């Protein structure tokens, strides 16, 4: 692993739940004690099901939600900064959302939308600006005439390219891609994934790639962290995680992704989990996955599992991990 | 005799921007107890095909014509609205992607389940309630009796979709159409629903049309598959034929751009460009502008369906044998 760009330590984020009459509302622990690292120029994949807190980690890193813990970006702890101090740093931290079209103001042209990003950070005023917009459009594979277009004229893939374009305008070091390709059709999704990889090689970007789609995450990530109910249950290099998954949740998740091959599908051993995700306002004691875990034993309910290094740089939080490996 | 036989189905919408040919000559056939997958990307006409089969499109904006549209011995094009209503749910039922939009938020689950039973099966309240509990248990909902008195917002997404499936199955239909029924669900829940559909199909012999953009899901669940592009079925056949011997440029393209969980590092080959605008007439292969395997004849005429294997047909001039692969077994 190269030079660390972002280090998150013991991050906690909680939200107030629904209030009840004469009673204090529940507290939903969206993220409870997450630590992770992203190296410069590399991609960390963050996977898990809806409600596991993967997007919340992204928002906490961007300081869009209140959090406790430490978020160290380029040796500065972002959590300790004021909004004003945070502002110049935002230039280096950008985000792309799932629904790109809704993040574009429908009354502005694409050119203005890209220029807006430049203006906020006082970059490229005057004559250079037009050229810069052209250059940015070219970078994401769109012809310069798109600068005159309005968002409603774009297809889903084009809107996503514009969102990437806007993020790139300020020359960031880290881009958080929050389900950035999930809404796209596979043929368009492949175009955007290849674009993201090309840009990474060219500009040395680091990504936090948040997605529920493990096939996509496997394709794009160097490191992967698997989340369940606000905690990271397993993390390691992409190949370790996919070839040697240890945590029962990772195994179940991997086994439930369908493969486009009839014979492979026929011969696979599938771990089908029973039930739904527990209520995050009242997570199970001990290991949070134990209520759906096919291998849970009595001890799992008693103690929250500690993270163990099962092989070099491959961490698992499961008390039965030595038994599985 | 086939349970469902569709020949040359066209559905056109009249819009402010002209006629949109959403479905343009689709032919399908489905036997009792079979699972047919329809795959393709957004806008290819998968859902409109299903809605046309159910005759659910409003006649003032959609025109549906076909050479043949036979289901269970009846010509769906000739039925009156009253006959169609009786046909739906009793003999063919449909499950949509977003269960929250199909369920009525102000009625309890029980009310919505028994409604169908009372109306179509002419049961009394007590019998309908008993059957509703059976159905919920059948689709894997625990504490079914309690759930009957709950409202849709009290259920999780996976449970709502189970309720929708229970409603769809309540009158023992011979055909279940599932339109992206698991797309909005998490993968672990998706796996549960797929298992459920497999069980139901085995136990009751229900025929299923499974509409999805997910090739993997179709590979694991379906017997037959139809690949749609720009309102047409460009290739169809048994799942093994189509997956191991893809014979249309679009099918090959689709497979090459789908990331596989079991694949290590082979590059994704995106299909460049975008699908055609369906409000303009299409005179050649609709995939031609995006196809990397086009041959000279592609530029002149529209390809006809050619037979590739026993049940395998494709409308493509190209020679795609280099893309065939051996089955894993």
Image (tube, rainbow, N blue to C red):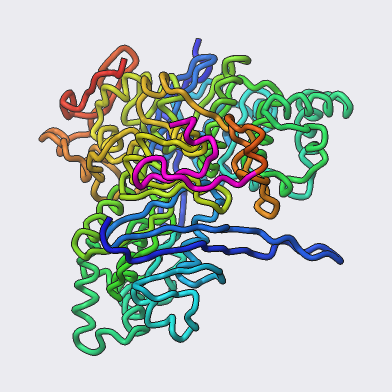
Q: Height in image: A5 above or below B30?
A: below
Q: Which of the two residues, A312 or B193, is positioned nearer the viewer here? A: A312
Q: Quadrant of the N terminus of chain A?
A: bottom left
Q: Which of the two residues, A283 or B10, is positioned nearer the viewer here? A: A283
Residue occupying image coordinates x 20% and y 40%: B291
Q: Quadrant of the C terminus of chain A?
A: top left
Q: Could you tell me how many numbered marks the image carries? A: 0
Residue occupying image coordinates x 49% and y 66%: A59
Residue occupying image coordinates x 63% and y 15%: B204
Question: Residue A74, located in which quarter of the rendered image?
Answer: bottom left
Please indicate whether residue B172 sits to the left or right of residue A319 in the image: right
Q: Is residue B102 visible?
A: no
Q: What's drawn in magenta, residue-wise?
A: A303-325
**Residue A306 lies in the magenta stretch:** yes
Q: Position of residue B232 (x, y in %)?
A: 36, 34
**Residue B261 lies in the magenta stretch:** no
Q: Position of residue B301 (x, y in %)?
A: 19, 34
Question: Residue A160, located in which quarter of the rendered image?
Answer: bottom left
């Amino acid at each position: 692993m190269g030079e660390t760009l972002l280090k998150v330590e013991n991050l906690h984020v909680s939200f107030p739940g629904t209030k009840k009459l004469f009673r204090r509302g529940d507290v939903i622990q969206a993220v409870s004690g997450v630590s992770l690292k992203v190296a410069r120029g590399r991609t960390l994949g963050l996977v898990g099901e809806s409600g596991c807190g993967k997007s919340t980690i992204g928002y906490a890193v961007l300081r869009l939600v209140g959090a406790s813990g430490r978020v160290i970006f380029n040796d500065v702890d972002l959590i300790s900064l004021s909004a004003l101090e945070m502002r110049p740093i935002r230039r280096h931290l950008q985000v792309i959302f799932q629904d790109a079209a809704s993040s574009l103001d429908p009354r502005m042209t694409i050119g203005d939308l890209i220029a807006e990003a430049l203006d906020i950070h006082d970059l490229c005023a005057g004559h250079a600006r037009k050229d810069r917009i052209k250059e940015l459009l070219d970078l994401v594979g769109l012809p310069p005439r798109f600068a005159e277009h309005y968002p409603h004229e774009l297809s889903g893939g084009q809107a996503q390219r514009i969102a990437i374009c806007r993020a790139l305008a300020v020359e960031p070091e880290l881009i958080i891609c929050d389900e950035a390709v999930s809404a796209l059709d596979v043929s368009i999704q492949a175009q955007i994934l290849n674009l993201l990889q090309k840009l990474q090689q060219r500009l040395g970007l680091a990504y936090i790639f948040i997605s529920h789609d493990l096939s996509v995450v496997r394709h794009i990530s160097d490191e992967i962290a698997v989340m369940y109910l606000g905690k990271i249950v397993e993390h390691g290099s992409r190949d370790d995680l996919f070839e040697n998954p240890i945590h029962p949740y990772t195994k179940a998740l991997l086994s439930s992704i369908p493969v486009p091959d009839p014979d492979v599908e026929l011969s696979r051993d599938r771990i089908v989990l029973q039930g739904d995700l527990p209520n995050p306002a009242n997570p199970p004691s001990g290991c949070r996955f134990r209520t759906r875990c096919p291998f849970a034993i009595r001890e799992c309910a008693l103690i929250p599992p500690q993270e163990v290094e099962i092989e070099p740089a491959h961490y698992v939080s499961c008390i039965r991990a030595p038994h599985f490996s | 005799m086939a349970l469902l036989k569709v020949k040359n189905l066209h559905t056109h919408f009249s819009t402010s921007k002209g006629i949109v040919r959403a479905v343009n000559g689709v032919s399908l056939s489905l036997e009792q107890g079979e699972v047919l997958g329809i795959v393709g990307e957004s806008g290819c006409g998968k859902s409109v095909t299903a809605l046309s089969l159910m005759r659910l499109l409003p006649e003032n904006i959609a025109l549906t014509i076909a050479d043949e549209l036979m289901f269970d011995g009846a010509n769906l094009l000739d039925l009156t609205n009253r006959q169609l209503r009786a046909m739906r749910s009793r003999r063919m039922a449909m499950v949509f992607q977003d269960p929250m939009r199909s369920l009525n938020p102000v009625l309890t689950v029980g009310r919505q389940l028994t409604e169908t039973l009372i109306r179509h099966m002419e049961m009394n309240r007590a019998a309908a309630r008993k059957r509703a509990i059976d159905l919920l248990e059948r689709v894997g909902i625990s504490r079914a009796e309690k759930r009957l008195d709950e409202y849709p917002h009290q259920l999780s997404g996976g449970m709502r979709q189970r309720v929708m499936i229970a409603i769809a199955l309540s009158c023992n239909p011979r055909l279940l159409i599932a339109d992206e029924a698991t797309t909005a669900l998490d993968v672990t829940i998706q796996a549960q629903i797929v298992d459920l559909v497999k069980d139901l199909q085995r136990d009751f012999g229900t025929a299923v049309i499974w509409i999805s953009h997910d090739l993997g899901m179709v590979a694991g669940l379906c017997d037959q598959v139809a690949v749609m592009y720009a309102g047409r079925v460009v290739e169809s056949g048994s799942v093994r034929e189509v997956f191991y011997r893809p014979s249309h440029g679009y099918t090959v393209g689709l497979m090459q751009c789908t990331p596989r969980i079991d694949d290590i590092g082979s590059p994704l080959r995106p299909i460049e460009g975008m699908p055609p605008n369906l409000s303009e007439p299409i005179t050649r292969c609709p995939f031609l502008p995006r196809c990397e395997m086009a041959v000279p004849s592609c530029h002149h005429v529209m390809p006809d369906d050619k037979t590739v294997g026993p049940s395998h047909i494709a409308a493509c001039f190209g020679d795609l044998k280099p893309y065939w692969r051996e089955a894993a077994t």
